[in-house]
Amino acid sequence: MKQILTLFFFLSLLFPIDFIAIPAGPNLPQVNNGIPLSPNDSIILSLKTAKEDTSKINSLNILSRQYLNTGSYEEAIKYAKQSQKLSEELGFKSGLGDSYSNIGVACWYQGIYERALENHFQALKIRESIGDKQGIGNSYNNIGLVYLNQGNYEKGLENYLKALKIREEIGDKRGTANSYNNMGVIYLKQNNFEKALDNYVKALKIREEIGDKRGIGMSYNNIGLIHQEHGNFKQSLENLLKGLKIREEIGDKIGTADSYLNIGNIYFLQKNYEKALDFYFKSSKINQKIGNKRGIAVSFNNIGTCYLMQDKFEESDKYISLALKIFNEIGNKEGIKDAYYAFAELYDRKRDFKKAFEYQKLYSNIKDTLLNEASSGQIAEMNTKYESEKKDKALIKKDAEISTQQAEAEKQVILRNAFIMGFTFVLILAFFIYRGYRQKQKANQLLDEKNEKITDSINYAKRIQESILPPLGEIKKHLPESFVLYQPKDIVSGDFYWFHQISNSEFSAPQSKLFIAAVDCTGHGVPGAFMSMMGYNLLEQVVKKNHVHQPAMVLNELSKLVVESLRQKDQRGKVNDGMEIALISLMRNDKNSGFEKVDQTPLYNQLEYAGAHNSLYLIRNGVLHETKADKASIGFSSQNSFQFTNHTIVLEKGDCIYIFSDGFVDQFGGPGNEKFYYQPFRDLLVEIHALSMEEQKLKLEKVASDWRGDRAQIDDIMVIGLRV
């Protein structure tokens, strides 16, 4: 079973309710192929009379794994320790590695993550010492699983990729399928549904090819979750039921419990709370029987959320409290975050706004902690690696030039002497020419290797940058009719989009307030990415920590912080770097509602906007209205006394709002190889504004691609659209 994933949200008065879905877990380390899934009396009886040899060690490990498959973790550890002891006495390293691995998996299922890592690293060390490639692949896979449960997605993915590489090398199809499955879970956690589905389908295809029923059940479960995320409940339920049927047939108790929970989530989404509770309690019963703490906590949290939707506050409080207690016991920060969110909604519905705000703060703090743990150290590492390898590249290039010059000089000396010494020295001449060629070839090879490492580092930077961007699902949750078109020019981008919700308990309003921004930093590629990381963190600081909530005041404060961070005032190190930005906030103001019918008033009917060079377009009744930005950039010291303008707009139902960077309009293309320009861009938006937001995004992508043709993209492209 994989890490708990929060996948689906409902919007209420203040907080979105989170319920939890569980993707299917891994196949355990393969001690033997084709062994029964559950323990049987014949193996247990044979152990009583078995000789103290390697055959007994293998039988003990097989029995340990069978108990793991049925959720009997203490029994699994007991037999693994017997195998461990006998393996040490006989010096049987293969069996010793398997026993450490089985103990690690049992600890993982019980939520004892540090002990799980200790055993998996010990197993990896032993397997590397004997060259057991299949075992090494399994160890990397299981280490990745532990990191995933701890919320360390970078290390999780790093170990999954190591496992996949080894398994493909040795033709381990079952292991290869497991690696694709687990990588899919990482992408699902990051809301990259396309990559997640691609990996799940790859896993299913291999598992069907080799007849791996347990794995097929996992794949159907995970594919069902992807369809669930896209709102295809019928297709989702079909896949989940296929997975459940297989899991029940083979006695996979853990998988059966997960399937019950995920099917319950479908009924929850359809507001059939009684059926949802029935499946949640079935899942809870199995997890309690097998001692799966993580699964118990997930079931309880979902039961509490279900009762909350029925306004059964006492029962809701009971089960969310039980879930939070278990999440704290096993150190599952993602689960703790979800429980805090559920409590915030519970107290909001009970009109206890003080406690609701307290739990919302706890939720925000642990969410920030998870983000910082996953990215802060990696950002610094990215910067160091990039600068170091850039210097290495320059040195290697210089060495190559020197080597080439030396070879050329030697060649000239030999040629000159050849005229004097004749044919005798022809072989010597050939030798030196060949040596020069080899030196040059070696230098070029080193240069290619360094280039590859730098590209790998930049790809690593891309993953870090993508991890801080707000999930598109989070924006869609609050603004269902919206889209984000985001196309970096290079691997990493100087543009970024930003989203944040402020609850109504933080200011006087009946509805929460939403912020969304389109930001264009100086440059693109790696330099632009560094600026965007800094800009993102400073924007978070101004709004979340400094509690500045008016767009113009946000830009004023942001500009000051950028100047201070880049030391723009210091003439000795002056850097003309900054940002262009369009920032809007949305809220509901009932004083602005002058409509007789409620359905004529949008949920958010007041917009505030401030811009640095980037304007705002609003289309109402087929007419485009432009609110011009201030002609000033964020972060230039000469503008330190400048104050940005705040614009307030009363919205009407059906209004379409667009903010953007200049990448779309500045792109060269078309028959005359000229810029697209703003007027054609405005005409295009008017032409497509009546389409759905998803269709608008596809149309913009097609127009940009057709206009560019086979020319290179010259800048990062970003357009954000929404309809109220």
Image: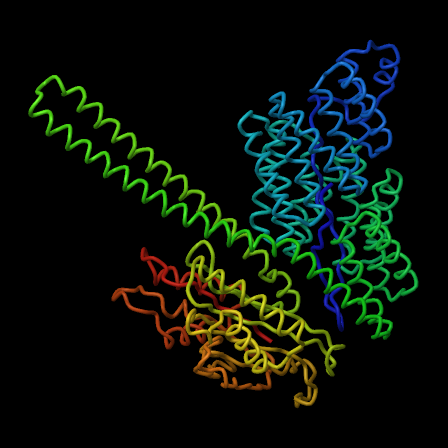
Q: Can the viewer see residue 575 in this picture?
A: no
Up-down: is 354 above or below 34? below
Question: Left of 392 or right of it: where is 196?
Answer: right
How did the renderer colour the structure? rainbow
Question: Left of 75 or right of it: where is 522?
Answer: left
Question: Left of 542 or right of it: where is 65?
Answer: right
Question: Left of 221 or right of it: where is 434?
Answer: left
Q: Can the viewer see residue 196 in this picture?
A: yes
Up-down: is 252 above or below 357? above
> Could you say which is closer to the camera, residue 446 or residue 403?
403
User: Residue 367: x percent and y percent?
Assistant: 70, 60
Q: Quadrant of residue 216?
A: top right
| Tally of numbered tags | 0
Q: Quadrant of residue 666?
A: bottom left
Looking at the rendered image, the quarter that the C terminus falls into is bottom right
> Could you say which is closer to the camera, residue 154 or residue 486?
154
User: Residue 434: x percent and y percent?
Assistant: 24, 26
Residue shown at 51% from the left, 52% from the top: 384
Looking at the rendered image, the quarter that the N terminus falls into is top right
Up-down: is 635 above or below 76? below
